[in-house]
Image (spheres, helix red, strand yellow):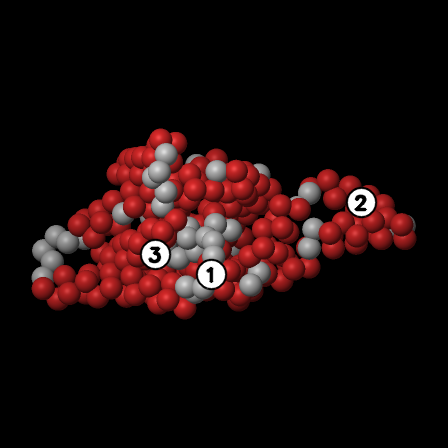
Amino acid sequence: MGAADSVPGVSGGTIAFITGIYERLIAAVAALDPRAARHLLRIHSTKGRQSLKGHLLAMDIPFLVVLGTGVLTSIVAVSRLMHTAITTAPGLTGAFFFGLIGASAVVLRELLALDSPGRVAAGVVGFGTAFLVAGATRDTGGGDPILPIVFGAAAIAVSAMILPGVSGAFFLYLFGLYEHFTGELKAFVDGLIGLVTGTWTVEEVLAPATTVAVAGVGGLVGLLAFARLIRWALDNYRAATLTFLIALMVGSLRKPAGDVLGASANAGPMWLAGVLVAGTIGAGAVLALDHSTQSLTY
């Protein structure tokens, strides 16, 4: 799931379907209750420890901890690779992302419902929102967006991890924050290693650590708040919600297309061939995943 959610267009929710843990994941996330922390005040007593244990098991915390550790480990590893790709070859990476997102929209086309005015409106709003946002945003790269934006983007990205067909990285990419987030995470991990080896100072680690911490808190809020909202929307307005998400993906294609065009100055035949290959690889990865999971029902 972490590897899937580290690239725009591939859904960690789909990976959860493949491994048979999707329903358990949704139930565990929906059961999270911060009020269980009050039992920590009575952890010194046997009854308090038993109450805390009971609530943790009821929320399936052991499952979430093991799953979360795997997700975070993979995000750290894959995001380093993607940061290197997007900073050294933005055009080719944009083509790869275009293939991923475009093929994902094609794969999910059967879930598109335009059989009522409300669902048509959901599709129009989704496409229009993504198209406008994709045109207005520019990846911050090494910039420094204000922390409230980091908080909000992380909340939306993490809550999206449980959606089939949409990845958390997709929203970061759409918001123009993908390169910044992957860069800050890479710098934070390098800084921790540097502190151990003596090549980094605490002051140098502080900036990326602050971004990672704010993003972590935002992600937790996203799980506790947005995930429940998403579950409610899927339970009550499933067709309209999925139509909105698919239209959002189609409208967002403006972002990778712009990245490819922006890097095409003085492009030769070899570069154009590379763009086609990168886009084909991205689309092929999604189509291969879809082929192996045709029996799944979202």
Circle 3 residue: 107
Residue name at image x 35 percent, y 38 percent: 115
Decide if residue 265 is on the left or right side of residue 211.
left
Circle 1 residue: 296
Q: Nearer the viewer, residue 181 or 105?
A: 105
Where is residue 103, by image quadrant?
bottom left
First reached walking from the N terminus: tag 1 or tag 2:
2
| Element carrying mark 3 | helix
- Residue 18 to residue 109: above or below: below
Q: CA distance from mark 1 to mark 2?
A: 40 Å
Q: Amino acid at mark 1?
A: Leu
Decide if residue 79 is on the left or right side of residue 16.
left
Residue name at image x 60 percent, y 42 percent: 224
Q: Nearer the viewer, residue 127 or 38?
A: 127
Q: Position of residue 48 (x, y in %)?
A: 86, 48
Q: Amino acid at mark 3?
A: Val
Q: Nearer the viewer, mark 3 or mark 2?
A: 3
Q: Amino acid at mark 2?
A: His
Q: Which mark is residue 26?
A: none
Q: Position of residue 264 (x, y in %)?
A: 15, 54
Q: Which mark is residue 39?
A: 2
| Element carrying mark 1 | loop
Q: Position of residue 261 (x, y in %)?
A: 17, 50
Q: CA distance from mark 3 to mark 2?
A: 46 Å
First reached walking from the N terminus: tag 3 or tag 1:
3
First reached walking from the N terminus: tag 3 or tag 2:
2
Residue name at image x 52 percent, y 38 percent: 236
Residues marked 3 and 1 touching at CB (< 8 Å)? no
